[in-house]
Amino acid sequence: LFILLIFSFASQAWAQEREITLTLGAYATPREAYRRIIPLFQKAWQEKTGQRLQFKESYVGSGAQSRAIAGGLEADVAALALDLDLDRLAGEGLITHDWRAKPFNGIVTTSLVVIVFREGNPLGIRDWADLVGGKEVEVLAPDPKASGGAMWNVMAAYGAAKRGRVGGYPEGEEGAKRFLADLFRRVFVLDKSARDSIINYERGVGDVLLTYENEAWVGKLAGKTYGYVIPSSTIRIENPVAVVDRYAEKHGVRPAAEAFVDFLWTKEAQQVFAEL
């Protein structure tokens, strides 16, 4: 019996060594990209180590995801839309290394805030001012309380008005506040994530959509008939990624988590991000 127990424990330990699981907590927009990248990394990891690697994945708005990880969702890797959302995890003691020391200051993807319009641009949308003029424009955008994409929308709109690039609003902080208030009076649906917003827009909800350029481009590649314009003043979106130290170490998967994060900057993974 003693020998059988030893054999059983040894077998379980061997099985655990041969297969591990990583949990990815990500914002919703790059879900399809990660679902193509993960199998590429699994293959590369098994060829390198002989170890099978499983993934658990969670995709919601960046702010909601950051709060979920801080609240106990034990993600080994956090891929979020804003550096503030990673900084929240660092402030909670979950990320203890300098995640900005990675390539490109820890930024794995970039994009721009754009304005998406219906086929043929029936409302003549060309810039920010067209969203708040005399025409009744129904704007679709995610909720800044839950979505990192929404926060980028807010910063792009606020910055444009503050720089005096929105007609009818004075340059400076007061004009920026007024424009932002007027813009969000036209936002009649606040979705939970940027991905939810574009799905609803494709279902026919709203006249225009504020979103990432890559989201609009993916739709165009898929044959969607809407178009988009890059406003005369917008913002460069930067999306960070990091190992969540406390959970990766707790689960004994730090080497795999580190390798996965590093893999995201390889040509192979960046090609997928570029396509999606």
Image (cartoon, rainbow, N blue to C red):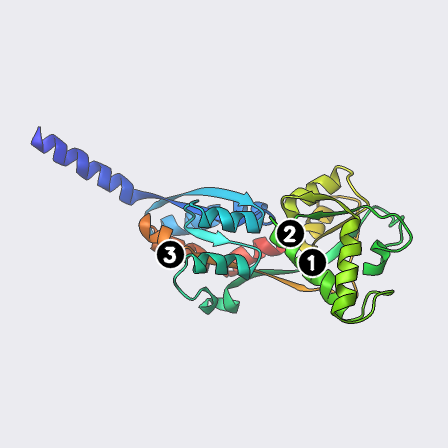
Q: Position of residue 153 (x, y in %)?
A: 69, 57
Q: Is residue 206 above or below residue 211?
A: above
Residue 166 seen in this snapshot = yes
Q: Where does the N terminus fall, quadrant-wise?
A: top left
For mark 1, what is the residue?
154
Q: Element at badge 1?
A: helix
| Earlier-in-chain disc, 2 versus 1 | 2
| Earlier-in-chain disc, 3 versus 1 | 1
**Residue drawn 74% across and 57% down?**
114
Crowd around label 1: few <14 · some 14–19 · many ≥20 (10 Å): many
Q: Element at badge 3?
A: helix
3 left or right of 166 in image: left
Residue 225, quarter of the rendered image: top right
For mark 2, what is the residue?
144
In contact (CB < 8 Å): disc 2 and disc 1: yes
Crowd around label 3: few <14 · some 14–19 · many ≥20 (10 Å): many
User: 169 or 267, which is in the foreground?
Assistant: 169
For mark 3, what is the residue?
245
134 left or right of 196 in image: right
Q: Is residue 167 above or below residue 269?
A: below
Q: How many marks?
A: 3
